[in-house]
Image: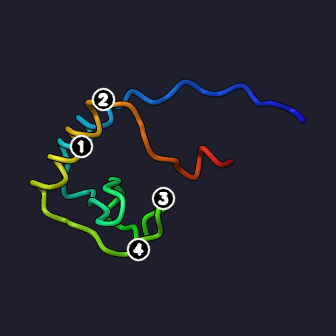
Amino acid sequence: MTHMAESPPPNRAATAAKIASNPTGYKVCEGCDSIVGSGAALCPNCHSYRFETSAERVVQQARILGAREQTTVTANDLA
């Protein structure tokens, strides 16, 4: 079995700041609280189709997620 070198994790605080500066480009999944692009029909993490789209909620969730370590499994983790 070949083990690929892991890439360094993205800077969560920088990503959160980018999202918070353009909240209308994103929405928050009501199934798992992930932030996804505004064009997503399904959450890539939990496959929910319910989203909160208010700018206030997106900014709030970006700040929460940017201040802590990743705790969810994403599709990239399974690849």
Residue 51, image x, y percentages: 27, 69
Q: Is residue 15 above or below residue 23?
A: above
- Secondary element at tag 3: loop
Residue 26 is marked as none
Q: CA distance from mark 3 to mark 4?
A: 12 Å
| Residue corresponding to mark 1 | 62
Give the Cα distance between marks 2 and 1. 10 Å
Q: Which class describes the residues within 10 Å of circle 4: few (<14), some (14-19), or many (20+)?
A: few
* Disc 4 target residue: 41
Residue that label 2 marks:
14
Q: Measure how far apart labels 3 and 2 are at the Cα level.
A: 21 Å
Which amino acid type corresponds to the residue marked 2 in the rendered image?
Ala
Rendering quarter of residue 11: top left
Of the numbered discs 3 and 2, the one sitting upstream in the chain is: 2
Say if mark 1 contacts mark 3, CB within 8 Å.
no
Q: CA distance from mark 1 to mark 3?
A: 16 Å
